[in-house]
Image (cartoon, coloured by chain):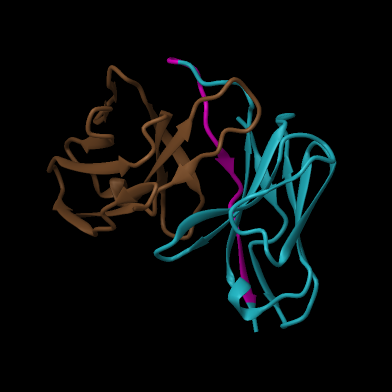
């Protein structure tokens, strides 16, 4: 089974701090994603990467950046944390192969990092 | 109109009941559909894919209605352990690379003894 590991389960940071959220997957997947999840808003895509050193903006990239120096690791960076970035952050990994009937396909999520910015 | 819409619930059902959720999507080009389950304070996990012909996995049945643009999840003989939030996921199918998926906000199910 794919394992996606996020480095921290809970984090409390101060406004203005630079915050690093780390994510590692062990199945050699090309595609990795960072989402945030907020009540009533569901999962919103921040950034994704489909290969080493490649990154693409998602739906809400403002205030975030990412780094993918190695295939297994995808880091989310909050350049200057703000209180509206208090959220649950979920990393996910996925194989890029097109799905077909009977194929096993889908995202595997890490257990999440609950970030509070005070 | 939201790309993917779900009734947030909660659906409170007694043990043993049958319950069904729908999820509507707005993009008619959507080709891939999934149901995820998310327990409280946990990450979403893939429950099942939704195939054009409909598919069943034990007590769970997923169906797709392309004409009306919705997918459904039916749970028979509900168990207490089925209590969770169920997210629908919709994606266009393209030839490769990244496929933008859209997550619904989820429907909360509470099975009561």
How many marks do you count on the picture? Answer: 0
Where does the C terminus of chain B fall, quadrant-wise?
bottom left
Lateral position of residue A101 relative to residue A116, left or right: left
Q: Position of residue B46 (x, y in %)?
A: 46, 36
Which residue is at 78% across, 34% downward? A51
The answer to whether A21 appears left or right of A91 in the picture is right
Question: What x and y, as percent, mark residue B21?
Answer: 23, 43
Q: Is residue A118 left or right of residue B14?
A: right
User: Residue A81, located in which quarter of the rendered image?
Assistant: bottom right
Q: Is residue B21 visible?
A: yes
The front one of A53 and B43 is A53
Residue A14 against residue B26 in the figure, above or below = below
Which portion, as a residue range, is magenta?
A: A101-116
Q: Magenta includes A19?
A: no
Task: Give the residue furthest to the right.
Answer: A69
> Does the magenta segment cover residue A110?
yes
Q: Tell me residue B10's x, y (percent).
A: 24, 59
Q: Main secondary structure of the magenta part?
A: loop
| Residue A6 on image: x %, y % | 68, 52
Chain that is coloured brown in the picture: B
Asked whether B111 or B105 is in front, the reply is B105
Residue B113 visible to an observer of this rendering: no
- In the image, residue B20 sits, relative to residue A117, either above or below, namely above
Relative placement, left or right, of A100 versus B51 is right
Q: Nearer the viewer, residue B28 or A75?
A: B28
Chain coloured cyan: which letter? A
Look at 63% across and 23% down and name the residue there: B96
């Amino acid at each position: 089974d794919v394992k996606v590991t996020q480095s921290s389960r809970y984090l409390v940071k101060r406004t203005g701090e630079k915050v690093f959220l780390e994510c590692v997957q062990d199945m050699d997947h090309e595609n990795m994603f960072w989402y945030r999840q907020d009540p009533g808003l569901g999962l919103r895509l921040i950034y994704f990467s489909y290969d080493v050193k490649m990154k693409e903006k998602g739906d809400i990239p403002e205030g975030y950046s990412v780094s993918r120096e190695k295939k297994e690791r995808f880091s989310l960076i909050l350049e200057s944390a703000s209180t509206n970035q208090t959220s649950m952050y979920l990393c996910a990994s996925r194989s890029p192969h097109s799905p077909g009937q009977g194929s096993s396909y889908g995202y595997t999520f890490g257990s999440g990092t609950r970030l509070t910015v005070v | 109109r939201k790309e993917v819409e779900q009734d947030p619930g909660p659906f409170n059902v007694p043990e043993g009941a049958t319950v069904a959720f729908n999820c509507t999507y707005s993009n008619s080009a959507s080709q891939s559909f999934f149901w995820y389950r998310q327990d409280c304070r946990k990450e979403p996990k893939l429950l099942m894919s939704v195939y054009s012909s409909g598919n069943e996995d034990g007590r769970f049945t997923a169906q797709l209605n392309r004409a009306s643009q919705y997918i459904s999840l039916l749970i028979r003989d509900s168990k207490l352990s089925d209590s969770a939030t169920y997210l629908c996921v919709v994606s266009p199918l393209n030839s490769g690379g990244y496929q933008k998926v859209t997550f619904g906000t989820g429907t909360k199910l509470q099975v009561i003894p």
